[in-house]
Amino acid sequence: MANRTLDSYTVGEVARLAGITVRTLHHYDEIGLLGPSARSDSGYRLYDDTDLERLQQVLVYRELGLALDDIRAAMGDPGFDRVAALRKQRTQLAGQARRLKRVIAAVEAAIRAEETGMRLTKEEMFEVFGDFDPTQFDGEVKERWGDSDGYRESARRTAAYTQEDWMAIKAEGEAINRRFLDAMASGVDPTSDQAADIAEAARLQIDQRFYPCSPEMHANLGEMYVADPRFAKTYEGMAPGMAEYVRTAIATNAARTS
């Protein structure tokens, strides 16, 4: 046990400094990724500057999309070189910065197009998505659901979307996926109300942006996220087991609204 010193921080203070939750710090401690260097006489976690440096490293790795198990393995390696790791991260972040620069240029082009009435090409319209084209499955979708009210409504809405609209949709989707990732990483049960609330946010995005999506329809989509290799690859690329986690959360949300 130890008394708190001027250069130590409580779990609440560290959470506020890092912009994460106390529960996330507790989870990092439980899985051996980041534990406090000391505890107070009352048993409370106390973190020092070295702990904060390690947390910074963890959060940078998380931002780059690494799974917690991979982060723990890398940082637990006696040969782990913090400077080399930071240099590698700098290179990756510089690449992201270049992409963001291209995105900003694309947005500026969209603004000019809106102001002048000029039509954007398909390539310009979806440049913001990088290698992902949200229309790439249009032919298949039309063949499977072209006669459905949902397909017609989605086609009607998306036909009027500008690049800014697609950017907003992409940002919304990324925020929802980040919530799923954080919940899974923190050990949140996919059958809990907390996970179901995230699933409801995902359902509402579809409902508001594309076509009316009932909880039952969303549950069917959740099954496709696991069964269809393309969807599964997307989710599993974020974190192993995520496709199943999302499907379970969606099913939980559908069940509680039935």
Image (cartoon, rainbow, N blue to C red):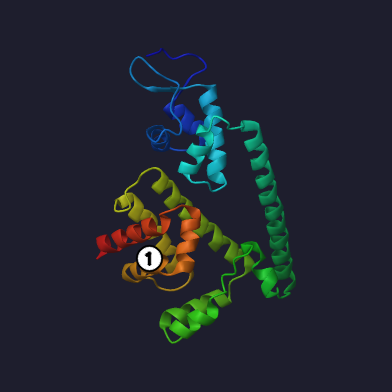
Compared to residue 84, the image places residue 256 above or below, namely below
Query: Residue 165 or 45: which is nearer the viewer?
Result: 45
Q: How many marks?
A: 1
Q: Residues within 10 Å of mark 1 (few under 14, many from 20)?
A: many
Compared to residue 248, the image places residue 163 above or below, namely below
Residue appearing at x 55%, y 42% in the figure: 61
Compared to residue 48, the image places residue 220 above or below, namely below
Q: Position of residue 247 (x, y in %)?
A: 36, 61
- Residue assigned mark 1: 222
Residue 208 visible somewhere in the drawing:
no
Quarter the C terminus occupies: bottom left
* Outermost residue, bottom side: 147
State left or right for residue 73 relative to residue 102: left
Query: Residue 69 or 34: which is nearer the viewer?
Result: 69
Query: Residue 167 or 82: which is nearer the viewer?
Result: 82
Residue appearing at x 69%, y 66% in the figure: 110
Tell me the SS state at disc 1.
helix
Quarter the N terminus occupies: top left
Rendered image quadrant of residue 124: bottom right
